[in-house]
Image (cartoon, grey):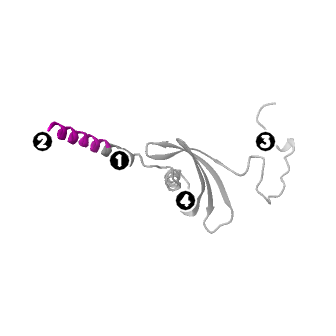
Amino acid sequence: MGYGDAVRRFLGLILLVVAAAALAGACARQSIDTKPAVEAALRAYLAQRPGLAMDKMDMEVKDVKFKGETAEADVVFRVKGGPGEMAMRYTLRRQGNQWVVERSGQTGASGDEMPPGHPPVQPAPPEKLPRTGQR
């Protein structure tokens, strides 16, 4: 075996090692930018919430938007066999190879708005408001 053959074998070995390392890196960094990955993170988060009976509710992830290291998920909850639904928006942050819920909030209505079809609510007169102890 001559010098040229040895160099070619060495370069071939180097190329093989580099290709294997690139493949291993690609497999280790699987994309978690998927709706099922976000849904799994939400279910894990909700399972840890005390007093929340998820077995009595249906959860539907309506939409997920990925923005780099964060994701925003619009989720609807319905009581099984009951009327009505509640919409929530969750902000999640990537931690390693999974999503973790950072914060949540109700969507679709602000504190001043009622759901469609709700009867009008009149503000309470000042004498009916609770006293705060300040005058």
Cα gap from disc 4 to disc 2, whole angstroms: 70 Å
Identify the amino acid type marked 1: Leu
Identify the amino acid type marked 2: Met
Q: Which residue is mark 3?
A: 130
Identify the amino acid type marked 4: Met
Dot 3 falls on a residue whose secondary structure is loop
Q: Which residue is mark 2?
A: 1
Dot 1 falls on a residue whose secondary structure is helix
Q: Which residue is mark 4?
A: 54
Cα gap from disc 2 to disc 1, whole angstroms: 31 Å
The reply to whether callout 3 and callout 4 are in contact (CB within 8 Å) is no
Mark positioned earlier in the residue sequence (2 or 1): 2
Identify the amino acid type marked 3: Pro
Within-10-Å neighbours for mark 1: few <14, some 14–19, many 20+: few
Q: Residue 45: x and y, percent?
A: 51, 50
Note whether 3 is above or below 57 in the view shown: above
Mark positioned earlier in the residue sequence (4 or 1): 1
> Is 105 on the left-hand or right-hand side of 110?
left
The magenta stretch spans residue 17: yes
Within-10-Å neighbours for mark 3: few <14, some 14–19, many 20+: few
Mark positioned earlier in the residue sequence (2 or 3): 2
Q: Quadrant of the C terminus?
A: top right
> Is 46 on the left-hand or right-hand side of 87?
left
Tag in front: 4 or 1 = 1
